[in-house]
Each structure stands twice: as C-alpha cells, then as structure tokens.
Image: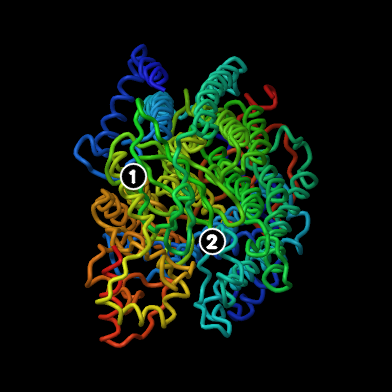
Amino acid sequence: MASDSLPLPGSIALTPSQEGSKAWLETVHEWVITVDHKRLGLMYIGYALLFLVIGGTEATLMRIQLAHPQATFLSPQVFNRMFTMHGTTMIFFVAMPIVFGFGNYLVPLMIGARDMAFPRLNAFSFWMTVFGGLLLYFSFVGGDGLYGAGSAPDVGWFAYAPLTATAFSRGHSTDYWALALLVSGIGSIGAGVNFIATILSMRCQGMALGKMPLLAWMNLVMAFLVLFALGPLTAAQIMLMIDRYLGGHFFDTQAGGSAVIWMHFFWIFGHPEVYVLVIPAFAFVSEIIPVFSRKAMFGYPAMVAATVGIAFVSLSVWAHHMFTVGMPSYGNAFFVLTTMVVGIPTGIKIFNWLGTMWGGKIRFAVPMMFCIAFLFQFLIAGLTGIMLATAPFDWQLSASYFVVAHFHYVIVGGILFALFGAFYYWFPKMTGRMLDETLGKWHFWLFLIGFHLTFDFMHVPGLLGMPRRIYTYEPGRGWDIWNLICTIGVFFQIAGVLVFVFNMIRSYYRGTPAGSDPWDAWTLEWSTSSPPPAYNFAKVPVVRSRRPLWDLKHPEDPDWKYE
Amino acid sequence: MQSRGQKLESSPKRQPAWQVAAALLYAAATALAGPGNGSASPTSVFAPGSTPAHSIYDISIFVLEISAAIFVVVAGLLAYAVVKFRQRRSDDETEPSQVYGSNQIEMAWTVIPVLIVVVLFLSTAQVIHRVEDARRPPGAIDVTVVGHQFWWEYRYPQFGFTSANELHVPVSNASDAMPTFLTLLSADTDHSFWVPRLAGKTDLIPNRTNKTWVNPEQPGLYLGQCSQYCGTQHALMLLRVYVQPREEFDRWVREQQQPATLDPSVAEGRRVFETTACINCHTVRGTVADGRFGPDLTHLMSRETLASGIISNNAANLRLWIHDPDAIKPGSLMPAMNLSDPELDQVTAYLLTLH
C-alpha cells in the first residue's frame, strides 16, 4: 500500500480552514447562492430524501388501505390522489434529483475537474427542480381553484388523456401537475446539458474517453437520454396546457383529439426515463463492486458498449407500455422484439459484474452488501421484464399488480438498493466521517426483509387478476392474504429507513473520521481530502489509466501497462 | 394449439435444472390458480377457459420456464461467487490477480442471450398473430361493449337490444363453435376489459374502436373488472360474464328483446320515475324513458347485481341505491334525486317489476 502518498501532494495543504462561527442566516445564504457542484449535489440529495419521506408516507397510507378488503381508511378520492402524488413524487422529485445529486457531486471529482462546465446553469437547474416540486405540492392548497373540485391531482402519474381534459378534471390540480413537470423538466434538461459538456470537455490530462471511470461514462449516457426523453414530455405538457386553457384539441377526445397520442408522447419519455434512473444505479454498482472485490472491472469496453446499446435500444421500446391499446399485430411484434433486445446488453452487464467478483477477495462491507442484493433483485426484475415484454402475457399482466411489483423491483430493488450502497460508499467522502457499519447492517437486513415481503408477494395478486389503482377490493378473489403481507413488509422498510436516517445523523456528528481514502479505492475522488475543498484539487491530476490510484499504490504493477 | 402446448412441455424434460424450476413454478401456479383445483381465485390467469386465454397461458408457461432456467444459472453463479470468493480471515493483504476481461467469454454471454431472444420472439409473435388476427367465423355473436364512468354497456346489434353490467355469451365448444366478438368503445375516459380466464385485456378508448374475442368452453360465471384507471370509482367497475349453454342463451336473448313489462299496480312508481330526471339517463324500452347516460333498465330485474356488480340486486339494495348512490359507490355519477320516502318506495316497486 502506498496510502501514505495520499492525498496527492499539494491537494489539501492549501485548503483554508473553514472553521469559525457564522450566523446561521449567513450559512443559509451561502448555500442558496452557491454554484459549487458539491453543495448543489448535496442539496439535490437532501431535497430528494425529503421527498422520499413524503412519497413513502403516501405509499404507506395506500398500503394500510389495501391491507384488508373493503377497508374504509381512505376514500376513493384521497386514494387516487395518493397514488398520483406517490408516483409523480418518486420519479420526478426523488429518483431524478438523487441521481443528479450523486452525479453532480461525483462526476467532476472523478474526472479531475474543479466544477461542472456551467456552474450557474447547474444552480439554475437545481432550483428549477425545487420549484417544480413546490408547485406539485402547492396543489394541495391551490388545486381546488374556484370549483371545489378537490385538491391534489388524481389522474395517475402518467395522466392518460382524456382524464386530464377540463371535462374530467376540473379545478387546477391537473394544471399544477403539468406545470410541476414542465418546470422540473427544464431543470433536468439543463442538468443533462451540463453533464454532457462537463464530461466531454472537463476531463483532466490523460483521461481519454476510454480511461474514464464507468460512473462518468454512464452519467454521460444518462445525460444524453435526458435530452432525448424530456423533450417529448415537455412538449406534451405544453400541448396539455393548450388544450386546457387555449381551446386546443390535441388530447380532447370529445372534440376529435387522440387519447392514444398522449400515451405515445408520455411513454417516449417514460421508457427512456427508466434508463435515466437505472443507468446511474449501474454506475454506482460498477464503482463499488470492483473496489470491494479488489479487482479491476471485468470487460470495461463491453460495459461501455452495453450501456450505449441499452440507451439506443431504449429509445425504441416505448409502446410495450401500450400492448393493450389495440395496436395491430405487427406493431405489437415490433415492440416485443425491441424490448427483448434490451435484455442482451443488460445480461452482458450482469455477467460482467459477476466476472469482476469472480476470483476476487470480496469484502462484505455495507456498500457491497447492497450491491449484491442489487444484482440478485435486478436479475429478477429483468426476468419479470421479459415476461411483460411477451405481449400476450402482458395482455394479462398489464396494469395489474404484477406490473406494480415489477417496476418496484426495478426502482426499489434495483435503483434504491444501489443508491443505499452509494450512500455508504461516498458518505465518508462527502462528510469526512464513516457511516456506522453495525447500524448499516441493521438497515440492510431490515430493508431487505421488508422489500421482499412487500414486493415478492405483490406479484401474486396481479397473477390472480388484481388491477392496479383500485382503492378497495372485494373478498373472495384470493387477494387478501397477499395484500396483508405486502403491507406488513412496508413497516420493515420504514424501520430500515429510520435506522438509515439515524445512522446518517449520528455518523455526521460522531462517526469515525474517514480520511481521504477509507475504502482503499482507485478513482480520483479518493485522492483529495474528505470532504474535498471547494476547488477539489489544488493541483489538477494527471492520469495514465482507468485506476490512477491503483497505479500510485502499485508502482510495480500499474494498470497503464495493460490498457 | 394442442400440439404447441405439448411441444413446449416436452422441452424441459431434457434438462434437469429446467425441470426442477418448471416443477416449482407449476406447483406455485397451481397452488395459486384455478377453479379446477380448489378455486383459490376466480380471476386467476392460470385457469384459462377460452382460446385466447389458453394461448396466453401456453406462452406464459414457456416464458416462465425460460426465466426460471436463467434465474437458476445466474443466481447460482452469484451465490457461488459470493461464497467462494469472499475474503477470508487467513488471507494475506495482497490483492488478487487483476483480470481485465476476456473477449471469448464476452462473446459467449452475448451470443447465448441473442439465441434466447430469437426463440422467445418467434414464439411470442406466433401467439400475437393467432390471437389478434383471428378470423371472425360467420356464426359468431357480436357484442358492442361501451365503457362508461363507472359501468359497462352491452349492445347486441344482431338481436336489437342493449343491456348493462352483466354480459351474457353462449358456450362455444370445438364441435359447435360460436365465439363472441367484442367491439370495444368508450363514452368518456379510457377503460379496459379484463376477464382473465377468458382473454387478456383490451382497452376501451374514446374515439377509437378496439376488438377482442372469447369462446368460453364451460358455462358459468366469469369475473373481471376494469383495469385501466378511469376516475374516482375505477375500483368498483366490475365485470361479470355469464357463459350459458346455447338454449339458455337463446332464451335470455328472447327475453331481453321484449319491451318492458307494464304492470298497472305500480303505475304510481312509474309516474314518479318518468316525471323526474331518471329518464334523462335511463332507458326503459316501451316507455318514454330513453336516456342513454346510464344503464338500460328495461330488464333490470333479470340482472343479479347492481352498480356494476358490487351489490346483489334486491329490493333493499335497490331502494338504498336510488336514495343515495354515494352511500354504496362514492363518486358514482348517478345523483341522489332527493325523493321522499313514499316516492322511493313507489319507484323501487316499479323497478322491481322490470323483469
């Protein structure tokens, strides 16, 4: 080990002491006006965690209502608002901000840059996202309009026309929904542009594209997908507003508009969106697994190619969300094929992660445990994805609880587990203190048990004919016991998250000091102090391989000899 | 159809891993499924009773088997790696040997998934074609299904009548095929017609005509419900399909074709019905009531349930429904008409005569 040569000479010594007492207002002001990618990244993450709690609360309310048949805990009106707000919140105000947050924090550090390419655009994007979330939640106050038509939106997170037309959605709740997505969408596009510019033009000396960490590659691909996906969504929101306020008839079926065209617009956004979220999760896993297996990533070029391949193909699969809308048989067959083809690069990724673990010396620290669970759950999510890609099977399963179970397997079992792994892995870098491993293991096991109780058993009622988005159901359909188990699982998940939150707060104040490189890792972010100074690197690093810190620690056997 | 099923089921026998996994899935499926074995759920997708549902079932089992095989292999490799390559206490501090990749291995785990995709795609395309492009035989029954917030309208254009919420179709067996072809329309928002044991779901979309078909082999009651979110009461928009032997179906059709019974003893109730807003929305054939927004009530009492299948159709429930629909189905679009108690009794008595 050559860790005494870390941090890189000159990177910390120049850091001015930031100690000293500031008025809290001054501190708040500093954070509000900041253009530092690290502070913006942390704010994205904090903002997303806040909404995670809100969205989770909404889910909990729904699960309580569904625990028993014919329950009266929530009225149908409230239940419909809850699932609309839960979906919209989790996708647009939890998942996207949190992956943007990690990307913001990590990408410049990992490519040896001092900030994002456009720091002020970065701040603008973040604050647009914030305003989007506030607009969505302001609907609880202002959604009634003058109509007494009920508060928050209740049109479902994909808001199929013509439910969003003024005839079926009076008041302003749908307007808040559309505006929230419009505004946060502008923020997302700004973030996408920024990631692309940063990664293409801000890399340190020696870091050719082929020597970038996989996290940077995957964030680059994610950013391109954001540009492709958010455009149609934004366009659709504008058309919807024209329909609602300027007498347009894009989606107004009563005046000859098309309900199906909304579906196309939404899912041309909606499917690449899945990859916008899951590719950063792949990125975390691709950084964590090598470090904790003590091996270089197996098949780096194949991983990059598979990522780009997934992104390309994902632009042509959207109508697999629409197998039941009566497309002709050849149309359905086309989307079956494209959807199944996504399985090939995805399979390559899973095998490459396994190949990385193969022959390694696996350390079971908490980040790695989350990544192993990710692999297992993502495998199952992929397989249920193949089932849903089989259009005839989808004619049964579409819009049933099987689909709900499937995409929660992707988003919770895949993306959220990878994110938890990322928290345990990079929290030391962000705060300078380790998260507690024992509490981390409690978090892991509680959440794992809760996740499997809820989402494994949620597949079953779908196979037994239970549609999604129903606020109640009658006994005698064979759904009762499965729903009860799902609800019980939720409380394990809540317990896990509470342990996690407690762990973060406690470790922030009392955790073991981390030092600059607590995991004995290989990428550039570990070469600077924890937390890094505002300018990241006093001396911009020069790299010769994909693992610059490996080269530094193993001068007798550096990577650049083999790449 | 049959030959396909046999072909698919024979393939696992050659591979022990497949066989184990398939057996497990079969066990799980039968435990969860169908009327044949213990009737755990009347809406299980694993208890098909009509050709489209059978075709879907066959391809589903095929996909489940392939998925199970992939799962066993990959999860097995993962478990092996986790156990075998964990860091041991006895390990020295050296790093394991660094391997950067292998083109041969990458090629192998690219080609195998490609082959699986080809097989899956071709099998799937075949089923899509068979179900979606099925020809309508000359003797088929036509029904036009119109989705409303939050109930179903059934029109029988060949027989010239309209009914609601309880769909009747004839049995169709191999020797005497009489499938029912459904034309799917919507009066307002999106809905979806899903009776899992008869066919996969197809959406009802305003401004668009969709089709589906069923040919149930056994008489009986088949349940389902709307499966595309359509507004407040999406949850209580239930589907009931009565599959009847041919003679019984023909008798039902003849009864439905009759105009409404006019019973002089309930003239007072009929007067209340026809002089309030009831007739803006409801039709009673043979009277002045010809509204189209709500269910046709000409033969209301031939139906077993009210409010789209959520309560049984009896005098008490009917009276409560007329008095305050929201008490039974909050968000229902039928308004409470604020009738007095005697008027309620009279209207209920009138409706009870509409056999």
* Towards the viewer: B296 or B234: B296
Q: Where is residue B52? Give x, y as percent.
A: 43, 34
* Towards the viewer: A417 or A104: A417
Which residue is at a point 34% across and 30% down the rendered structure image? B173
Residue A177 seen in render: yes
Q: Three-letter amino acid code at disc 2?
A: Ala
**Residue B113 lies in what quarter of the image?**
top right
Above or below, A297 against A226 in this view is above
* Towards the viewer: A20 or B112: B112
In-image side of B318 versus B210 (left or right): left
Which residue position holds label 2?
Answer: B187
In-image side of B45 versus B144 (left or right): left
Callout 1: residue from which chain? B
Q: Identify the element where label 1 is drawn.
A: helix
Dot 2: within a 10 Å radius of its alpha carbon, few (fewer than 14), some, or many (20 or more) residues? some
Q: Identify the element where label 2 is drawn.
A: loop
Q: Where is residue B255? Give x, y as percent.
A: 33, 54
Which residue position holds label 1?
Answer: B250
Callout 2: residue from which chain? B
Nearer the observer, disc 1 or disc 2? 1
The mark that comes first in sequence, 1 or 2, is: 2
* Towards the viewer: B205 or A1: B205
**Is mark 1 in CB contact (under 8 Å) with mark 2?**
no
Q: Three-letter amino acid code at disc 1?
A: Asp
